[in-house]
């Protein structure tokens, strides 16, 4: 019989050996720790071999009773438990038939319409960022990159100099998954400008004093997520963005996804660019499109476009 606490620590060690991102490991440990406290204290279950689907359902019911989390968040907790128990099966701590997550289904999520920036707001946000100093140009490039690539703010913070190629950027995404995003001509223009100013800004520093991250603060250290949030919110406020838009870096991601769909990209290609594991996750962005947008996409990709028909 193996104690749940020991297996959770073993799971953590394995995730770190596999090179999972620190943030991913931390959120897994938070979710598993909270679950383990409930299982042991409330249900008096201490060994993995004794856990049944009934115990898992009791935990889900308890989280629902507390009522502080939406179903989408609870589903993320369920996903972590599925990964954990699959690990126990793979490592032969339990048998496949004894996996308590086998018949646990996700909760039904509320289908909300995603409201994000419109084209005019995006134009005003970008044009609000001046180009007078190193910080100005850096901030403008950050805003452009978030909007032009749809990457997550954590992914942007994690970009290192070696990740930059001539035509693309290597992105280190969730779950240690890597993908490439393109560099558009407008983005390349501001990348060159930023790189020149960065070189000038830190020319008196020794190489070991400069962090290896692509985006640097005034002390040559990497930028934090909170700093990037502040940069975007400041320029959203100056640009007069509608109140229903949160003005977070994730809204740039929403805008990117919806604009790509309006321009006729297919769901599979978009999911690759966004770093989604499942096209169903990407499909939620379709709910934010107006009916006229859907009709225009249909016209653009009509099966008879380019087909010669005799009159």
Image (tube, rainbow, N blue to C red):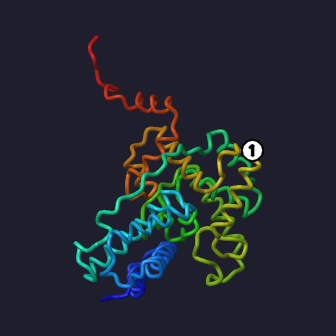
Residue at the far front in the pictured view = 43
Instruction: List the residue tagged with mark 1.
Output: 240
In the rendered structure, the answer to whether residue 307 lies left or right of residue 146 reads: left
User: Quadrant of the rendered structure where residue 81 is?
Assistant: bottom left
Question: In which quadrant is the C terminus drawn?
Answer: top left
Camera-side residue of 10 and 40:
40
- Residue 56 screen position, x and y as percent: 38, 69
Determine the residue positioned at 27% across, 77% down: 89
Picture coordinates of residue 282, whole percent (x, y)? 43, 50
- Which quadrant holds residue 190? bottom right
Compared with 19, 225 (above or below) is: above
Residue at 34%, 26% in the rendered image? 305
Compared with residue 301, is residue 183 higher up or lower down, i.e. above or below? below
Direction top: furthest residue: 311
- Which residue is at 58% across, 68% downward? 157
Is residue 94 found left or right of 78 in the rendered image? left
Q: Secondary structure at mark 1?
A: loop
User: x%, y% of residue 296?
Assistant: 46, 29
> Foreground residue, 155 or 3?
3
> In front here: 209 or 302?
302
Residue 53 on image: x %, y %: 33, 69
49 in relation to 225, above or below: below
Q: Residues within 10 Å of mark 1 (few under 14, many from 20)?
A: few
Query: Which part of the image, by quadrant, shows the N terminus?
Result: bottom left
Tell how many labels.
Answer: 1
């Amino acid at each position: 019989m193996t104690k749940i606490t020991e297996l959770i620590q073993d799971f953590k060690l394995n995730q770190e050996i596999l090179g999972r991102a620190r943030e991913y490991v931390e959120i897994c440990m938070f979710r598993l720790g909270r679950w383990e406290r409930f299982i042991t204290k409330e249900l008096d279950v201490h060994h993995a071999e004794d856990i049944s689907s009934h115990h898992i359902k009791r935990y889900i019911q308890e989280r629902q009773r507390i009522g502080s989390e939406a179903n989408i968040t609870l589903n993320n907790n369920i996903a972590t438990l599925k990964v954990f128990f699959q690990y126990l099966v793979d490592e032969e701590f339990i048998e496949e038939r004894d996996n308590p997550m086998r018949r646990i289904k996700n909760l039904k999520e509320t289908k909300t319409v995603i409201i994000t920036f419109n084209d005019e707001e995006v134009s005003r946000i970008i044009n609000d960022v001046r180009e007078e100093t190193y910080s100005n140009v850096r901030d403008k490039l950050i805003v452009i990159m978030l909007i032009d690539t749809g990457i997550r703010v954590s992914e942007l913070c994690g970009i290192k100099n070696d990740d930059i190629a001539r035509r693309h950027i290597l992105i280190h995404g969730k779950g240690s998954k890597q993908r490439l995003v393109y560099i558009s001509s407008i983005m390349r223009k501001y990348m060159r400008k930023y790189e020149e100013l960065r070189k000038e800004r830190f020319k008196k520093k020794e190489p070991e004093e400069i962090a290896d991250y692509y985006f640097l603060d005034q002390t040559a250290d990497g930028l934090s997520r909170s700093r990037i949030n502040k940069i975007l919110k400041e320029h959203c406020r100056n640009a007069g963005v509608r109140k229903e838009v949160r003005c977070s870096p994730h809204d740039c991601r929403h805008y990117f996804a919806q604009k790509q769909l309006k321009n006729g990209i297919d769901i599979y290609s978009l999911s690759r660019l966004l770093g989604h594991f499942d096209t169903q996750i990407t499909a939620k962005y379709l709910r934010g499109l107006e009916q006229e947008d859907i009709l225009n996409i249909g016209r653009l990709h009509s099966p008879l476009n380019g087909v010669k028909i005799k009159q």
